[in-house]
Amino acid sequence: MNDKSQRLAARSHGPVYAPGDKEYDGERTGFQLLDPHRPAVIVAATGAGDVRSAVEFAAETRTPLAVQAAGHGHAAPGTGMLISTRRMSAVRVDPRARTAWVEAGATWRHVVEAAAPYGMAPLSGSFPGLGAVPYTLGGGVGLLARRFGFAADHVRRLDVVTLDGRLREVTAAAEPDLFWALRGGGGDFGVVTGMEIDLFPVARIYGGTLFFDAGRVPDVLDGWRRWTADVPEGMTSGVTALPYPDLPVLPAPLRGRHVAQIHVCYAGPAEEGRDLVEPLRSLGPVLLDTLRDLPYAESGKVFDEPDRPHAYRSRNLLVSDLRPQALADLTKAAGPSAPVMTVVGLRHLGGALAREPHVANAVGHRGAAYAVTTLSPVESGEEEKVGETHRDALAPFAGEALGRSLNFSFGALGGDEIRSAFAPGDYDRLVKLKAEHDPHGLLQANHRIPPAL
């Protein structure tokens, strides 16, 4: 142990690691393997007390500080201290109040499994392995989003250690400015140790995926766009398009094809869901159909995303509309001939996402109709090529772009790009709050708000 880790270990109940310790690499590495954190010391927190001790130490020594739960989309490697919250994974459900208390390191899988016995569901993301707290701090567009809104809209309380070492109970009444900022403004104002969130009476969904060959059905993306124009708010959907390699481990109907996958989650009776998706089946030959009635505990099967850690980068735009020509250009730019393997993602927004919550928060661009994302695995030396490919693929949507989402930005963003995630007045307010709560800029969040205008 180095001197810093020894001093921290004396303050912490959980383990503290330094470079050279055998546990160091496993603790610093999350789901995102590209450019992992390289801290001088890791505090493997077991509770709010450990977090508070670590933050106090960072403030005393002016040590840069980062926080990692599941590490799904981190973008700012820490070189000072890393607080790992993965051991703080408890979830407590109050079935009468229809709420859950979620510790900082819990994933959505933990929350979904805790709520399911009561016939309830959280506003969880498409990937169950996502950290519930960081996802919610960034806004959170999940499987029930069009029905109930952003995950950040349904936070009742946050326990937060601020850079002055205080453990604060942050609510609309007790800490209104912090409550506003943390719900949608990201994790740049303190270290959240837990949150109380609403649960919803959703025990089952109609969901899954329809798979199409984008080479044989070139207008499948636009067909999905047209279909979204009339669906009810209970229907949340998206499209993922990617070239499948010709490998025997993959389903035979998909091998060697450029596949467009339409993902559907309907928060209503299965028979209604079946009727609503019927027009999608007429877009062209369906390669595979996994749509069915599902318990919400199995909602991760809707998008069925890879659960193995890997290195990747992603960019996105929030847009007011999807022009047919832009979708055609996207299909070509991110297809099999793209310079790097590129996954295209489209999400249908609107519905409850467009409405202001009962208590205002920092979530930006509620008027966006769709999100457009590009994601690529990154091999050594490919990051510049990946960035250029993503910029080219998103260029056709510039005319309809309103800004971007921090949650779908897996990679470093420039100052103007971060600013574009918020309304101008809201961004200025976030900057002032950053200066108030972290004037030295010690907290290294994924997408940093500067502590000064």
Image (spheres, helix red, strand yellow):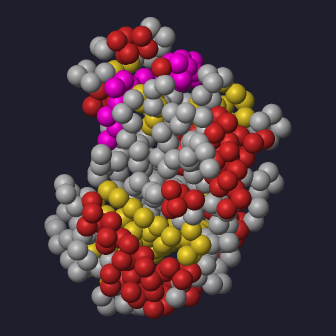
Where, by quadrant of the figure, is residue 206 drawn? bottom right
Q: Quadrant of residue 195?
A: top right
The image position of residue 363, as x and y in percent, is 66, 57
Residue under the image location 64 percent in, 79 percent down? 231
Which residue is rendered at x = 50% and y = 79% of the image? 398
Q: x%, y% of residue 173? A: 83, 37
Residue 5 vs residue 253, the one in the foreground: 5
Residue at left offset 39%, top offset 62%:
314
Quarter the N terminus occupies:
top left
Any part of residue 80 in sight: yes
Residue 127 is situated, as x and y percent measured from the top left of the image, at: 46, 54
Return the residue nearer the eye: 10 or 125: 10
452 versus 94 height, above or below = below
User: Residue 248: within the magenta?
Assistant: no
Span colored in magenta:
36-60
Q: Nearer the viewer, residue 366 or 255?
A: 366
Please tell me whether residue 374 is drawn above or below residue 102 in the rendered image.
below
Determine the residue positioned at 61% across, 45% down.
452
Residue 327: % across, % down: 44, 85
Extreme-top residue of the structure:
10
Q: Is residue 101 among the parts visible in the rendering? A: no
Please tell me whether residue 58 belongs to the stretch shown in magenta. Answer: yes
